[in-house]
Image (cartoon, coloured by chain):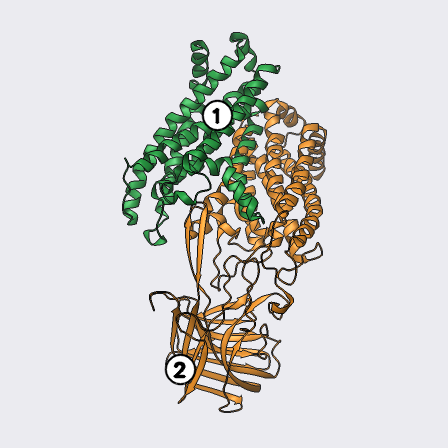
Amino acid sequence: MTRELHAEWTKLRTLSSTAWLLLATCALTVLVGALVTAGTRASDGPQDLPKLVLGGVQYGQATMVVLACLVVGAEYGSGTIGPTLVAMPRRLRVFAAKSVVVSGLACVVGVLGVVGSLLVGRVVLSSDGFDSFPLTDGSTLRAAAGTVLYLGLIALLSLGLATALRDSGVAIMVVLSVLYAVPVLTRLLSSDHWKWRLEKYAPMKAGLSVQATKNLAALPLSPWHGLGVLALYALACLCLGALLFRWRDA
Amino acid sequence: MSTLLFRQVRAEWTKLRTVRRWMLTLLAAAVAMVVMTLLGAAGGSVQHAGGPGDVPPKGPDGKVVRDAFQFVHQEMNGDGTITAHLASLKSLVEDGAPRAKTEPWAKAGIMVKDGLEPGASYVALLSTVGHGVRLQNDFSHDKAVSASGAWLRLTRAGSRFTAYVSSDGTTWTKAGSVTVRGITANAQVGVFSTSPQHSEFERNIGSLGVTDVPAHGVGTFDNVTVTGGIPGKWTGTAVGHSPVFDIPGVGHPGSGGGGGGSSGVKDGSTIAAGMITVTGSGEIGPRPRGSDLVQQGLQGALFGLLVVVAVGSLSMTSEFRHGLVRTTFTALPRRGGVLVAKALVLGTTVFVLSAVALAVAFPLGQSKMRASGFRPPGFPKWGLSDPTALRAIIGSALLVALVAVLAMALGAVFRHSAAAIALVLVVVLVPQILAGALPLGAARFLLSVTPAAGFAVQQSEPHYSFTSDLCLPDDGCYPLSPWAGLAVPCLYVLGAMLLAWWLLRRRDA
């Protein structure tokens, strides 16, 4: 397993696009979070401050999706999947190594992004006239840790789907559509019943409910349950990817 | 040149036509549009469909309007002038703490109206609590004429109405004029007052809570003179207040409730010693944005759009990936022409496909929504023959085609489908999601400057900024007018095409 991990890490590390995408994920998370926070005034009413500050991950996840899809999609695109599997014939191990490397990177970037968002957000909030929120509070820590896990799960979900689809472009389109189009559709749906159901079980909505620190009773799913729903999606995609990767010709 | 372009177009059409995967994907996009439109239309329900007894009033142009206010009036035969001094205008919001809140759209002023029926044609010069003096007519026309001015005058000459504003009652400045043909010679003139409900809303990421509090506008007038009327015969009428109606399916009804309320404020009017005090509630204006059936019936376009993004970017990037681009440029060396030909072929194909798919899906979706309660009189009936519906369908198809071309051009810029697809999806979809999380001003800005602004073309009614209704992104309201909205993605396409053209010429293939 160490061999596979080492190989995957080398492949990812030596691509210049990896560093750029990771940087973009971190920067987008912090920047959009700060912008959204800066646009909110204390007079707009009470706000869920940690959630507001961490909202940038909705943008930052897009580049993470691209990276995760490229990890496997690019191998099919350029044909390096052949040499990879010749060198390391245990396919499930290769797949596991890819998952570990990608989710590890996502979590590291997530930590950086979340810490950056919280620190920048507190500065912006104090200039907006809000009372700052405590950083070590239980619910804030849950929101922060949950956001990091959210990013990792999104990366795993993308990796699984990209492995199943074997094309980075199509995989990116599918993942981003599922993440972003479902909330847009929810807004326009005429049936309240379906609206509520979609809000409850759509991957992004469910996963991001972990960021809530206030008004928990009004949420369709409790924070950890919501993240659990996303974890189930990620698990399903990983299993699908692993199965197809194992049984299909490369 | 033209024969060269023709050859390039034919070459591109052959490339697009003969890749079976793309044709299948494009067909899948068309099917997705139909299926998603039908799914989006299904399952809705209306709690209150509106019985025959409470038919909402229709304005002079046949559209449903809101028309509820307190009117103190007399008859004016033919031409004449009404002048009034608005001594004070107050907004009373029925809430726990008295006088703590004001409704900025509470209004009072002078009006010439074609009878007392709700929905009758009118011209009004009115002062608002928070939005200055305005000249309005026939529910959907509004002009801000002055920031302040307590003396108001409206002069009728045939179908021409001229408004004057003064701060002291002696020096008058002309504030504007309108031509309204729907007011007969025997018109009702007088002073009026009204106030829409006071809405407070709390927005958080993904959730929205709106509370409506009844509110009253109180206008106190003196020095009210009418020339051309029958002197001294003032009558007070509550226009449009009985029966009280709510337009079904509307999230935040702005139409006023009945007179009176828990706090003891009663709508009505008193006339004493040259002073006329009018207390009214309700709204005069177009129907509030509720369930926009046209927009709801075209949701499939969004899903078709997602699919064609892939085809658009791949039609360009796969040439780079397989080295076909070198063959293409050797055979047809004018690189700009190749780009234009690709855009033409892709854009036209996608437009025709989506227009057909949406035209098929729209009537089916509408009949489905009618079956679940979205039907007249509460909701308009839309068909393919309505110019508005037709505009929305053609506009949606154009939007899908524009996004496909944008993906193609960005494919030429990045030479990598992953980057092109991700960027297009992010600029088209993310603003719509982020808009639900941002404060209103920032959300409107985002929905006006990103390609997502193009979705405004799907709205059957624009947002009227001169009413108390909010343009909430959560309700699917886009701030721009339909064609202005569609112009925004056009500009993006133009920019991307220019960049792609420059890079194609400059870079090695």
Q: Which residue is mark 1?
A: A156
> Would residue B503 be visible to someone looking at this image?
no
Q: Is residue B476 left or right of residue B378?
A: left
Q: Nearer the viewer, mark 2 or mark 1?
A: 1
**Mark 2 and mark 1 on one chain:** no
At label 2, the amino acid type is: Thr
Percent position of residue A100, x then y: 44, 19
Residue A160 in the image: above or below residue B154? above
Q: Residue at x 50, y 45 (%)?
A: B432
Residue B114 in the image: above or below residue B339? below
Residue B467 in the image: above or below residue B202? below
Q: Which residue is mark 2?
A: B171
Q: What whole-number distance in Å separates the C-alpha atoms at marks 2 and 1? A: 74 Å
At label 1, the amino acid type is: Leu
Element under disc 2: loop
Q: Residue at x 40, y 73 (%)?
A: B264
Q: Residues within 10 Å of mark 2 (few under 14, many from 20)?
A: few
